[in-house]
Amino acid sequence: MCVFCKIVTGEIPSYKIYEDDKFLAFLDISQTSLGHTLVIPKIHVPNIKELDSDLVGPLFNLTVNLAKKITDALDTNHFNIINNTGELAGQSVFHAHVHIIPRYPKDNLTIKFTPNKLTPEEFKNLQEKIIKSLDK
Ligand code: 5GP
Ligand code: ZN
């Protein structure tokens, strides 16, 4: 059983903040920022791509609602919502989950998008490639 499945069953303790029949939210052990929370489906799927599409909307809805409540409770209006899918994206636990990361002044956390300069042709190629795959 994976570590998050063990958290669902209670075999591994966690600081739970929300639970219903389908989802669980608990404090991330790393507390990258205070209030760093993970929202997971109770059912084991290795990543968000494998999650039943009926659960994707409710998971995002719950995540946004919890992000609002968590940041209210911790006196900030700022947060990141992050999902890591695959090792290259930084996924380390292969049970689908979404991070809620409250942000504070001078929290020393860097989530940086480094820009790549593309030509209009390169943009167009990318656009076409992606649009083609939407038809599959
Ligand atoms: P990922 O890198 O896969 O997107 O995120 C996995 C997260 O799970 C990490 O932020 C890590 O701190 C957290 N984590 C791993 N093991 C445990 C655990 O046993 N309990 C809790 N609460 N969080 C965990
Ligand atoms: Zn699992």
Image (cartoon, helix red, strand yellow):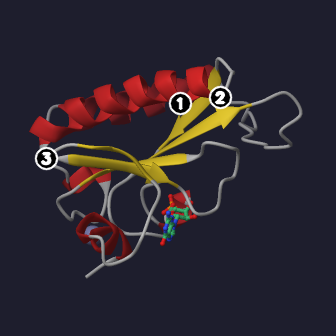
Q: Mark 3 — residue? A: 21
Q: Label 1 sits on what residue type?
A: Ile
Helix, strand or loop status at disc 3: loop
**41 sits to left or right of 81:** left
- Residue drawn where x is 53% and y is 30% of the image: 70
- Residue drawn where x is 32% and y is 64% of the image: 95
Q: Which mark is residue 70?
A: 1
Q: Give coordinates of residue 44: x percent, y percent.
A: 21, 65
Q: Label 2 sits on what residue type?
A: Leu
Q: In the rendered structure, which disc, 3 or 1, sits on the residue that comes first in sequence? A: 3
Q: Give coordinates of residue 129: x percent, y percent.
A: 36, 36
Q: Cα distance, mark 2 to mark 1?
A: 6 Å
Helix, strand or loop status at disc 1: helix
Nearest to the observer: residue 85 or residue 1 = 1
- Residue drawn where x is 58% and y is 20% of the image: 72
Q: Mark 2 — residue? A: 74
Q: Quadrant of the N terminus?
A: bottom left
Nearest to the observer: residue 83 or residue 133 = 83
Residue at the outermost bottom position? 1
The residue carrying mark 2 has its beta carbon less than 8 Å from ligand 1:
no
